[in-house]
Amino acid sequence: MNDDSLALYVRKVIATAELAQIEATVDDLGHQVDRELTKLAAMDRFDIALPELERLEALYPGRSSTRELMEDAGVTCEGLGLHETDPELLDEMMREMAQQ
């Protein structure tokens, strides 16, 4: 292998490593965007369900989670127009807001 071939090989190895790093970064950004879009869609559902959740909170105070509140009230996610994972997402978002 001559000096030109070695230099070309080294540049190719470096470019391959840089490409892998860029692809990983794009992947991470894609996941972040997906999470934010999921939160935005959930927030629309929360806006609709919030009055009923507030009413239930008044009837069943002191529950440690939205899921527990709904279970104690005998209310389903479907009945409130929520997805199955929304109660936990709502609790997570409320915790995040409280920390700010």
Image (tube, rainbow, N blue to C red):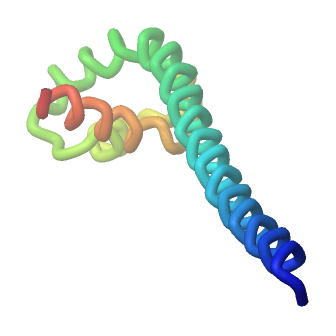
Q: Position of residue 51 (x, y in %)?
A: 33, 10
The residue positioned 58% from the left and 32% from the top of the image is 33
Image position of 71 (left or right of 94) = right
In terms of image quadrants, where is residue 49? top left
Toward the viewer: 28 or 63?
28
Residue furthest bottom as drawn: 1
Q: Position of residue 8 (x, y in %)?
A: 84, 69
Q: How many marks?
A: 0
Residue furthest front as drawn: 3
In terms of image quadrants, where is residue 14? bottom right
Toward the viewer: 51 or 23?
23
- Check the picture and name the quadrant holding the C terminus: top left
The residue positioned 82% from the left and 79% from the top of the image is 3
Residue 20 versus residue 40 in the image, above or below:
below
Q: Position of residue 46 (x, y in %)?
A: 43, 19
Image position of 23 (left or right of 66) = right
Residue 61 versus residue 2 in the image, above or below:
above
Image position of 31 (left or right of 77) = right
Q: Position of residue 11 (x, y in %)?
A: 76, 65
The residue positioned 31% from the left and 32% from the top of the image is 93
Toward the viewer: 83 or 98?
98
- Check the picture and name the quadrant holding the N terminus: bottom right
The residue positioned 40% from the left and 38% from the top of the image is 89
Toward the viewer: 84 or 5?
5
Residue 33 versus residue 48 in the image, above or below:
below
